[in-house]
Image (cartoon, rainbow, N blue to C red):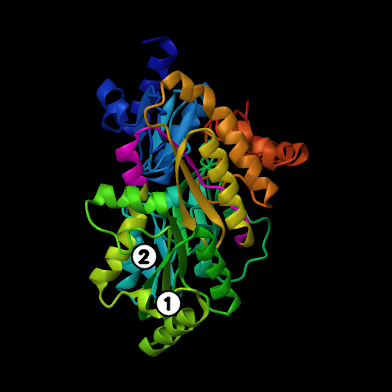
Amino acid sequence: MNNRHETLRARLVDALGASNVLTDGDLLQRYARDETSDLEHAPDIVVRVSTAIEAGHALAICNELGVPVTPRGAGTGVTGGAVPVAGGVVLSLERMNRILEIDERNMTALVEPGVITGDLQRAAGEHGLMYPPDPASLESCSIGGNVAEGAGGPRALKYGTTRDYVLGLEFALPDGSVIITGGKFVKNATGFDLCGLITGSEGTLAVITKILLRLVPAPPFTLDLLLPYDTLEAAVDDVYAILANKILPSALEFMEEDAIRITARHLGEDMPFPKARAHLLVQLDGPSGESVRDQAAAVAGCVGVPDGRIIAAESRTQSERIWRARRAIREAITAESPVFLAEDTVVPRSEIPPFLKGIKGYLNGKGLRSVMFGHAGDGNVHIDVLRGAMGRAEWDSTLPELKKNIYEIAIAHGGTITGEHGIGYTRRDYLGLALGEEQLALLKRIKSAFDPHGILNPHKIFVD
């Protein structure tokens, strides 16, 4: 252990206590990865904090000594955002996991960053309220991570993404100062929008220590539909038909045939219409059972699927079965191919059919197996490319061109390189495809204003 490392450890122990400063190799290894495929790097030290003041103390020490700090929530990201690729300190917020307040009158929730998204949704539901953002990993991802990544999910079509619900933040800067911004008020034209700036900044500007979130009245009735198709093009055409008929589902998802098959194998159960080339999953909600049934009838009246082939969930169990496959896709892919490329490009809805056709043709031409699914209602397409039996050296040499081509095809269709997973470490080399030099320079100046010594989550978002 060198003198600098020992000085760092001693100062952190003095400020936070020995039980909160971890240096044991086996423990460090637990913080060496997130859910990103094939990326691992252990930190030198893990610091677990319980308050904003403790986070500020840890940051100030690291800032003074020039030590990199990687903020970490639940570690469910898929672009390497929580992987300490520069070594240094992982600042874990896992202990800050309390729901501090559900305010029914103002329809807000005050939470710590380690709160699991699904737990907040259930807590809000007990008060007749709803926290709409629902990432696929909602039972394991944390609110702090959702805010840091600007997470989305199936309900983004009707209700928006995480950034639409952030009313206020408490965050610690690298120099140790703690800032509180925003509040329970609806309108705010006071100064720059710091909440908007921190949301989606991927832990590169500040460490989020408290979050004030907007809640909405929970719709008392929901209805889930599954629609099978003979072609993906027909499924996406019906996405347009549903929206063009002024029907706004709370979720409108698609799974193409490879996603259907791989998930069925993983779950060990038959899927509805297992030979379909695509499924649409439609969730409707409203103030009454009659209103959702009317919406379902309107959907049936404007799509190309015969009414007798549309499955309408008649119980919670049936609804869970419809959505279980969609939420298990990533798990199924990991089980079949532990190493894979996970992309989440986004294009205008109208461009989904030609975009997917172009991507599928390109990947098939390379002899690569892919699984595609995602948010048909907002154009956010998940493209997972499986390494399978390909050798490591060939896979590593293939990845740069593979990523570049996927991104360029998305941009050519009027889209961009990520809709909800962020840039992180794995996409930083390609940010210049989507953003011009002047915009990149502006983002870097913002980063420098918050973090002049560059200690926060280095090597993420930007190429050094």
Give how far across and how far down residue 326 sits, in percent.
Answer: 36, 57
Q: Earlier in the sequence, mark 2 or mark 1?
A: 2
Q: Quadrant of the N terminus?
A: top left
Residue 7 visible in the displayed image? yes
Which residue position is annotated with label 2?
A: 101
Badge 2 amino acid? Glu
Q: Quadrant of the C terminus?
A: top right
237 or 325: nearer the viewer:
237
Q: Is residue 430 left or right of residue 52?
A: right
- Spatial CA span between label 2 and label 1: 47 Å
80 or 270: nearer the viewer:
270
The magenta-colored residue range is 330-349
The quadrant holding residue 422 is top right
Residue placed farthest to the top in the image? 2
Which residue position is annotated with label 1?
A: 306
Question: Residue 386, labelled with which disc?
Answer: none
Give how far across and how far down residue 249 sits, in percent.
Answer: 48, 73
Disc 2 element: strand
Q: Residue at x 43, y 42 (%)?
A: 77
Disc 1 element: loop
Q: Residue at x 31, y 26 (%)?
A: 29
Count of numbered tags: 2
Q: Is residue 343 above or below residue 239?
A: above
Q: Is residue 167 magenta?
A: no
Badge 1 amino acid? Pro
Q: Is residue 76 above or below residue 165?
A: above
Residue 184 visible in the displayed image? no
Q: Residues within 10 Å of mark 1 (few under 14, many from 20)?
A: few
Give how far across and how far down residue 246 sits, in percent.
Answer: 57, 80
